[in-house]
Image: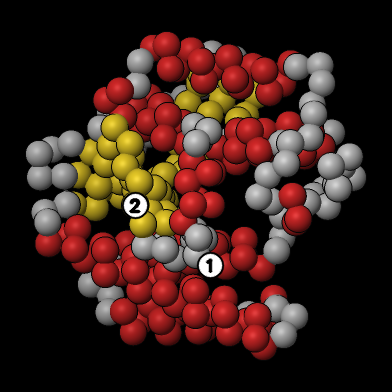
Amino acid sequence: MNQAKLFPSPDLITVTPSMVADYLRCPLRFKYLYLERKKGKLTKFYFRIGHLLHSIIYEFTRNPSMKFLELERSLKEKWDSNWFSNSEEEKKWYQGAFLCLKNFWEEFNKMKKNGKILVGSEIPFKIRFKKFLLSGRVDALLKNQNGEYEILEYKFGHENFEEDLVLLKESYQPLFYYLGLKYGYKIEPALFTFFFLLPNQQVKMDLKEITQETIEKFYSLIEEMFTRKDYPPRKNLYCQDCVFDCPLK
């Protein structure tokens, strides 16, 4: 896939999906990370496991004929016991990672049988969005039998699926990727699917419902991220892992 040529101005502010997600979870954390450039990225082992799963799934999407045993072998080779404080913790998370890979492999093969075609995976994009530069990477892009494109975004997920649904309520990721593909590759996706691997649950969103008003609202949110006067803390599911000083602690 070839991205449309982009000639960004040096004064454009780069915005990523992670930045938007951090801002929505906690404006104060966003301020510390992206405006004051303080070190405080979440480095708990489950974020490392998420990156590990993405790398293995990428290997698989590059070679979809891989057997599940090959994915399992890759997991064992890349697994790092030093991430964990004890063997019980490691065992629990290894079993979770194994289940995530198994669920993805089985679902991907079902998709192929149903006539879905993998167009690309780990697709990077950079597009100009007025005075901002939207930068991201699409996990996978599928083409359905009816010719429509579907974005597939996979996440580790939680055993309690309700926690995942909480995170989706304010997610702008579908719109972010829609704009990236539409203006970066001239592909207008019709569907966005969140695939939560651990609970093996999918949430689908109709991208045809996106309006100009929706896009303008998104732009206003991004402007707010960099121009508001106060950045209050906000309690969220990741507070326990945050290293910053916070009045809510």
Residue type (three-letter) at the residue carrying disc 2: Gln
Whether residue 126 is visible here, answered yes or no, is: no
**Left or right of residue 218: residue 105:** left
**Which residue in the rendered view is the most extreme toward the bottom?**
87
In the drawing, what numbered circle is on residue 114?
A: none
What x and y, as percent, mark residue 80?
A: 63, 80
How far across and down, in percent of the image, does residue 44 sit?
Answer: 70, 63
Residue at 74% from the left image edge and 50% from the top image edge:
239
Q: Residue at x 66, y 68 (%)?
A: 45
Q: Residue at x 16, y 44 (%)?
A: 144
Out of 35 and 45, give the one closest to the viewer. Answer: 45
Mark 2 = which residue?
A: 202
Q: Amino acid at mark 1?
A: Leu
**Element type at marker 2?**
strand
Image position of 49 with respect to 165: above or below: below
Helix, strand or loop for disc 1: helix
Report the front residue among 225 and 203: 203
Question: Which residue lies at the image location 34% right of the left edge and 52% below the top edge?
Answer: 202
- Where is residue 244? Give x, y as percent: 85, 47
Residue 149, by quadrant, is top left
201 in relation to 174, above or below: below
**Residue marked by disc 1:** 52
**Distance from Cα at disc 1 to Cα at disc 2:** 21 Å
Picture quadrant where residue 209 is located: top left
Crowding at mark 2 (Cα within 10 Å: few <14, some 14-19, many 20+): few
